[in-house]
């Protein structure tokens, strides 16, 4: 490049950054702080001006958007962090505050801490609509959590002050490496292949161990790399060359944010509830640690957005942050909902929704990773759309991506000969064997296939109105569901014996896949039932299959802690909507004195519903938004069940002649169920909920019941749901 070309490029770079709002009110570019204070002419270069480079002031060079604005009070400043087990010299050099009071991260989840609420839209497939099949459009009162939004703003209000904080937060790299490594060992549903994260993380740590921690200029260097260096991939690129693009001296904010987000996820599944130290002194809870990581990773996203970066690392960061942010804020939080929209925008901008041409310059390991990220995002999109009853953002009509091959993570980075051998061992449609255990790609493929069918169901549920009957479309979709399930490997078919034959790892995986399939069928039956009341039997049967599978899950006492901490979302997303349909219909048939159109005995239905509700009785007060939402919905189900059991006995004999020892519970067993249910209500009411349980006698229709339920003002979220990447 000639001197003239270099000068022209530099001018273009200056103009590009100046156009981003770094100008004064009179239209002239602002000066960096050292030049402004010294009253010398600044050349306005970013991230550091050339004059400061010559004067050796690069570490102090930054551009303040409002230099005359008074600083905030010191008591409001967020906590800085220093390395784990730092030396005394480092402590003196950093001069960071280590008092717990300096941190703006709350020590606990503080579920009740809200400021205002806003109404958000829920459609006909949302989990709330399951209590009444005819309800079309609903709104949900969603509390805004003050602590999470405050932390986000504190991190991203002024990037010139955020850079030093992010650099200091990056110092306990060994802690992050341990958490991320443990996450990949524990989590059954990872998306980004482990070597593409763990290897560059180790290379970065080795680089700093060898070169020493750069006390000055690291933030400017990372920003310079992010702003000016383009991640260019080539067909023959090795993984080592790829890692060099964002590690060592080429470290970028995209990778820094990815480290923070993955470490936050790792802390959420670590055992057994350890305390973490970011400065070698003060310890914080896993929840507070995850919140700090989420805020830091979001700040990295905002930095990358300033430079219009769209690359693979940005997509990885966006996806991982969405998973972590969902754990903290919940999916009904509009910030998280919008964040997923940003991820979809990046996917479209990179063309990940379209197949790569044969002469593509993308190496194999990166091509397969892109397919994994896209298919996982597609499945997440359908789950989120179904849960909220809103249109999906990644439509299959515009997507044409092959499934990722069913290879384990480490096979993606093999040499050509070994890779060819591994690919030849796959079936013609890309499946691998199960003798060596289950692979993340296997689960990604299966869940994507089910999500494809779910989109078809959503078109029938949420799409524009049909002229005439939808029976043919529904029958076709149902048959496709059956054919799909027949294609699922037998090893992953769930049954009650799975907990005895398979280990907990495979059992949970097979359960989730089974529930996603059943829930798709459940949605089909709901549409059928809305058009023909004769389909109620099929709807209740499919609902009870879901309830029974989840109650089997709840009986696994050795998994009880994991269920409460990590898998409560299964109850909210699958079991409680299905249980709500059954409880509502059971109550209606009881008060109307008509038979319950379900193949399962009445006693079994009541027993399973009671077990599902009582599972929350033995738990501590809600510690997550998911648990809180489950408790609120369970209270409504319990009230329906209590009113059904307390109804005059004349209304309980319409199911046909049944001896007391048969399908209908006898007086003693019925009393036991009622006592248990009432004790559940008492326990749940002690959780600080002020809403009164409604008098079900006044709920003449299911619509009345749903209207009451909508007025609860739930923070209905599924924090752990998207942890299953």
Image: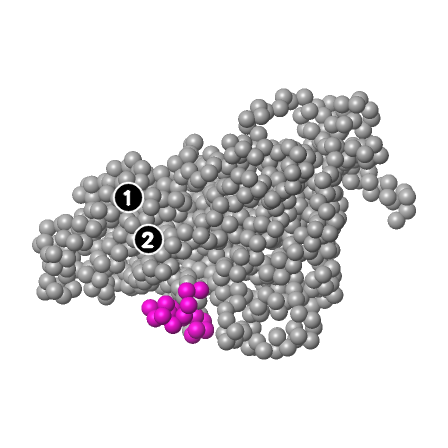
Residue 331 in magenta? no
Query: Residue 52 location in percent, x, y?
Result: 80, 32
Q: Which mark is residue 684?
A: 1
Report which residue position mark 2 lands on. 576
- Left or right: residue 594 versus residue 284 is left
Residue at the spot 59% in from the left edge and 60% down from the top edge: 194
Residue stretch rendered in magenta on the structure: 487-505
Tell which of 16 and 534 is nearer to you.
16
Q: Earlier in the sequence, mark 1 or mark 2?
A: 2
Direction from residue 1 to residue 540 in the image, left or right: left
Label annotation for residue 626: none
Examine the image and state in which quarter residue 197 appears: bottom right
Say which element carries label 1.
Answer: helix
Q: Bin the neighbour count of mark 2 within 10 Å (Cα to Cα): few under 14, some 14-19, many 20 and up.
A: many
Q: Is residue 503 magenta?
A: yes
Residue 17, quarter of the rendered image = top right
Expressed as whole percent of the image width and height from the top left, the position of residue 511 reads 40, 64
């Amino acid at each position: 490049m000639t001197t003239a070309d270099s000068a022209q490029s530099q001018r273009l770079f200056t103009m590009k950054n100046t156009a981003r709002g770094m100008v004064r009110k009179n239209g002239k570019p602002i000066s960096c702080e050292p030049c402004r204070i010294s009253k010398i002419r600044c050349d306005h270069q970013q991230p550091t001006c050339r004059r400061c480079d010559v004067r050796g002031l690069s570490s102090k060079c930054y551009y303040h958007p409002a230099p005359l604005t008074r600083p905030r009070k010191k008591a409001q400043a967020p906590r800085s962090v220093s390395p784990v087990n730092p030396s005394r010299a480092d402590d003196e050099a950093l001069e960071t505050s280590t008092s717990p009071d300096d941190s703006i991260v709350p020590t606990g989840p503080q579920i009740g801490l809200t400021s205002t609420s806003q109404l958000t839209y829920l459609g006909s497939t949302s989990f709330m609509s399951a209590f009444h099949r005819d309800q079309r459009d609903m709104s949900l009162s969603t509390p805004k959590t003050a602590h999470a939004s405050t932390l986000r703003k504190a991190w991203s209000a002024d990037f010139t002050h955020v850079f030093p904080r992010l650099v200091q937060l990056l110092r306990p790299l060994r802690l992050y490496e341990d958490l991320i490594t443990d996450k990949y060992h524990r989590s059954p549903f990872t998306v980004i292949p482990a070597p593409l994260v763990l290897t560059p993380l180790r290379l970065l740590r080795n680089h700093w161990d060898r070169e020493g921690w750069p006390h000055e200029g690291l933030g400017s260097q990372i920003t310079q790399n992010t702003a000016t260096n383009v991640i260019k991939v080539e067909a023959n690129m090795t993984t080592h060359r790829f890692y060099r693009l964002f590690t060592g001296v080429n470290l970028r904010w995209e990778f820094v944010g990815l480290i923070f987000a993955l470490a936050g996820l790792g802390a959420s599944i670590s055992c057994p509830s350890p305390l973490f130290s970011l400065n070698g002194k003060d310890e914080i809870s896993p929840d507070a640690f995850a919140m700090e990581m989420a805020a830091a990773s979001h700040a990295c996203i905002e930095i990358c957005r300033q430079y219009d970066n769209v690359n693979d690392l940005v997509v990885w960061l966006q996806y991982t942050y969405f998973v972590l942010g969902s754990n903290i804020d919940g999916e009904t939080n509009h910030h998280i909902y919008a964040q997923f929209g940003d991820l979809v925008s990046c996917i479209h901008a990179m063309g990940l929704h379209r197949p790569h041409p044969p002469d593509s310059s993308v190496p194999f390991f990166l091509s397969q990773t892109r397919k994994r990220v896209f298919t996982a995002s597609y499945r997440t999109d359908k789950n989120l759309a179904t849960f909220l009853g809103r249109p999906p953002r990644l439509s299959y009509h515009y997507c044409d991506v092959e499934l990722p091959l069913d290879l384990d993570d480490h096979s993606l980075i093999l040499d050509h000969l070994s890779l060819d051998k591994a690919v030849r061992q796959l079936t013609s449609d890309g499946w691998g064997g199960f003798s060596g255990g289950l692979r993340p790609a296997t689960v990604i493929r299966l869940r994507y296939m089910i999500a494809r069918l779910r989109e078809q169901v959503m078109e029938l549920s949420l799409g524009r109105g049909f002229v005439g009957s939808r029976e043919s479309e529904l029958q076709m979709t149902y048959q496709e569901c059956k054919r799909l399930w027949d294609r699922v490997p037998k090893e992953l078919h769930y049954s009650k014996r799975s907990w005895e034959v398979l280990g907990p790892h495979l059992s949970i995986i097979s359960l989730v896949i089974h529930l996603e399939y059943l829930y798709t069928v459940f949605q089909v039956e709901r549409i059928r039932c809305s058009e023909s009341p004769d389909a109620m039997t099929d709807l209740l049967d499919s609902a009870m299959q879901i309830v029974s599978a989840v109650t089997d899950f709840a009986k696994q006492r050795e998994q009880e802690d994991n269920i409460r901490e990590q898998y409560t979302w299964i109850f909210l997303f699958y079991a409680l909507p299905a249980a709500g349909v059954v409880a509502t219909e059971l109550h209606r048939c009881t008060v109307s004195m008509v038979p319950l159109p379900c193949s399962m005995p009445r006693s079994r239905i009541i027993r399973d519903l009671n077990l599902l509700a009582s599972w929350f009785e033995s738990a501590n007060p809600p510690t997550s938004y998911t648990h809180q939402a489950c408790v609120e919905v369970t209270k409504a189900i319990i009230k329906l069940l209590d009113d059904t059991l307390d109804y005059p006995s004349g209304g309980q004999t319409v199911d046909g002649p049944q001896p007391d020892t048969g399908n209908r519970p006898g007086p003693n067993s019925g009393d036991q169920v009622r006592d248990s249910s009432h004790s559940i209500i008492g326990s749940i009411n002690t959780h600080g909920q002020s809403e009164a349980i409604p008098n079900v006698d006044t709920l003449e229709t299911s619509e009345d019941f749903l209207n009451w339920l909508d007025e609860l003002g739930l923070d209905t979220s599924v924090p752990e749901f998207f942890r299953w990447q």
